Image (tube, grey):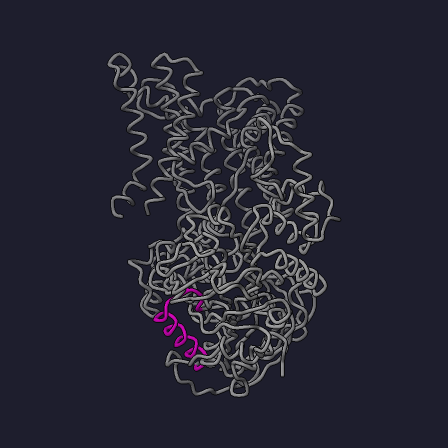
Amino acid sequence: MSHPAAQPPRLRLAGVAKAFGATLALRGVSLEVGFGEVHAVVGENGAGKSTLMNILSGALRPDAGTIELDGRPYAPVDTLDARRHGVAMIHQELSLAPHLSVTENIMLGAEPQRLGWIDRKESRARAAAALAQLGHEHLELDRPAGSFSIAEQQVIEIARALRTEPRVLIMDEPTSSLAQADTERLFTVIRQLRDRGVSVIYISHFLEEVKQVADRYTVIKDGQSVGSGEIAGTSQATLVRLMVGREVAELYPPRRPAVGAPVLTVADLQAGPRLGRAGFTLAAGEIVGVAGLIGAGRTELVRAVFGLDRCAGGVVTLDGRNVTGQGPRAGWESGLGFLSENRKEEGLMLPLSVAENTVLPKLGRMARLGWIDRRGVDGAAREWIGRLGIKAREPGQRVGELSGGNQQKVALARLLAYPSRVFLLDEPTRGIDVGSKAQIYELVAGLAQQGRAVLLVSSYLPELFGMCDRIAVMRRGELADCRPTAEWTEATLMATAIGTAA
Amino acid sequence: MKLNSMLTRLGPFLGLLLVIALFSISSEVRGYFLTYANFKIILTQTVIVAIGALGMTLIIVSGGIDLSVGSTIAFTSVVGALLIQHGWNPAAVVAAVVACGAFIGCLNGAAIAGLRMMPFIITLGMLGVVRGAAKWLADNETVNYDASVINNWMTTPDPFGWSLPPGAWVALAAAVGTAILLRQTVFGRHVFALGSNEATARLCGVPTLRTKVLIYTLAGAFFGLAGLMQLSRLRQGDPTVAVGLELDIIAAVIIGGASLSGGVGTVLGSMIGALIMAVLRNGSQQMGWPTYFQEIIIGLVIIAAVFLDRLRSRST
């Protein structure tokens, strides 16, 4: 939206940078948001959008750069301070207290009171007013928030944010768990906010939605703002080019694919609400990538293949044997290996030693009558510490003391130490430094060279293009397309993932 | 770092020495407190909590908890007394009492694993169920019997001699066995894996449900053994005995360095924790402190031990 030239924009960022240890999450982001403007911030997974929004909402402090709010320097010390300045954020994961009523949720932390007694009438009146502003006065004020649909809960959360009269409202992927009709309704709410003069920062990688709801955009790529402008008159192709336009470096080992006979066949696999129907085959010596947006069902696919999650339908065949939904233990035994995307929550036992983490799946094999050969265990761990270059003092060191990259190598060591024939890797290089990444790529390429089959799930496109023989794209729980890597470009792949295939 | 790992290993030891030193300050008390005869009493008083702490160590390391221990001890001691009454031979009584404890543990484990419910809730329920069953079985009164060799397990013929009561040796042997089980066997390492991160354990093919049932069953066998020692000490089966004993046992394991969130704990630590509890009780009595004062002291020691533990783990 336009504003008088003399007046500063509502929010102006210049050269904002942030580093976590050695990783530069933001290298220099500049953007301007006007009054009553919906400003879309778009970029690939890991481009730095979340870091940027955490800085704006006061959860993180920038290392460099300036931020101005209505022409005055803006440097919130925490999220509460940010709210006081009129900057509120709606996170992707909602943060309502499910057992409290709608009123209590909206008024939480700012309950009107008299000598410590809650003024219930006033509470209800204010909550009702906030909901009315959003055109959702039909929500029952006394019902527990948790009993409403996700879309309605989102409205309640927005109502809570409105209580503090925000000047800037940040919404992080607000439609990722909404159905189409709910998305339309949310857009109506956003437009109402805009018309009342609230500036909305809308983060998304669904480009159709951005085109629908936003006035202007900024593209973030590798921690930098690489382009801004009016949405009207900008094509989706332009946005995609800005988002992905970078080169594949010499990070990836040269490969001489020698694809053998099919090993793993997955047909019509269904599991939970996120995995609709997916089928593919994987041959010996082949690396197949799985691309897709967060929430497209990629993780659910590999978990279902391995048997970690219950399958609702479909068949997984390994070497002609049906291995559908047989559970992780039988998974290992039948020759499947699995690397979890979630190192800390699921992948590793942080309080235990490197050795213990490395040999757990084959502990039974290394023991005689239940009796562990500790020297054998330490020896095996030492071997893998050497082969993967894990920076650990001794096999007995606790995994929790290692750096992220080294932790990931321990998880990989566990996988490699077990003689599997099919390797299911879910985001094997997430959150680790470039040096460790290159090592992991080499190991994965080595597996394929030995005739093992690899399924590589990744959100990082250059990695898929650099490593895979074929790439499959998932979209909203379905395997949309699978083609040899040479037939994809980053743009066509993104377009397929987003659902705007040309 | 080095200093820290030393502290971790020696922490419970230092605590024990500190507690002993505390009661040795007064020269009046020291004269008796520091005698071998008194230490023998302390060791004997430790036996029941120590054997219970072995089972509890397995459970807490696996990330669980068991609140039904006191009830299990009372129930199994009543069973033991009834069997002696019926003229069973001592070996059969021992086997039956331990098996009875294991059965209760197995019920706990099966409910926790099968129903996927929190150990706290299940065992809280079992606390009541088993206590009630013990009273029912005993007709709500103590079960008396004439005499049995089992009565001699918690005493020695000569209270001032060097020999230790058989119960203390049983506890020691059980402790060594459990330590080896936890360190050297696949089952033992699976217990740690389960407590460190159940999701990882499952992912790595650890049979989590079966392991859980086994853990509670084995722990139940230890609680049965503790019930036997209780029987030997009282020389009668008393369904109202050992109320709240599970809290002493949990405290011993926690003072010994185990973490309530699982994955961390040692048998040696738990045994020293049990000793610290017994020394505190014994020393307070020697000092002539009233029992309410003992309770306050023990409560504060538990809080201090866990607080120090947190400081220790934060600095790594």
Q: Position of residue B225 (x, y in %)?
A: 50, 33
Q: Is residue B177 visible?
A: yes
What is the magenta segment's predominant secondary structure?
Answer: helix
Q: Position of residue A170 (x, y in %)?
A: 54, 57
Q: Does A169 appear in magenta? A: no
Q: Quadrant of the C terminus of chain A?
A: bottom right
Taking the image as shown, residue B120 lies to the left or right of residue A59, namely right
Residue at 59% across, 25% down: B78
Percent across and percent down for residue A368 are 44, 58
Rendered location of residue A111, percent (x, y)? 60, 36
Left/right placement of residue B17 relative to residue B154 reads: left
Q: Is residue A445 magenta?
A: yes
Residue placed most toward the observer, A163 or B29: A163
Q: Which residue is the extreme one toward the right? A: A138
Task: Left or right? Give the position of B225 relative to A137.
Answer: left
Name the residue: 27% across, 43% down. B6
Q: Nearer the viewer, residue A196 or A422?
A: A196
Point out the stretch of residues depicted in magenta. A429-449
The residue located at (64%, 48%) in the rendering is: B114
Residue B85 in the image: above or below residue A95: above
In this view, the residue in front, B52 or A460, is A460
Task: Look at the image and tell me in which quarter the N terminus of chain A lies.
Answer: bottom right
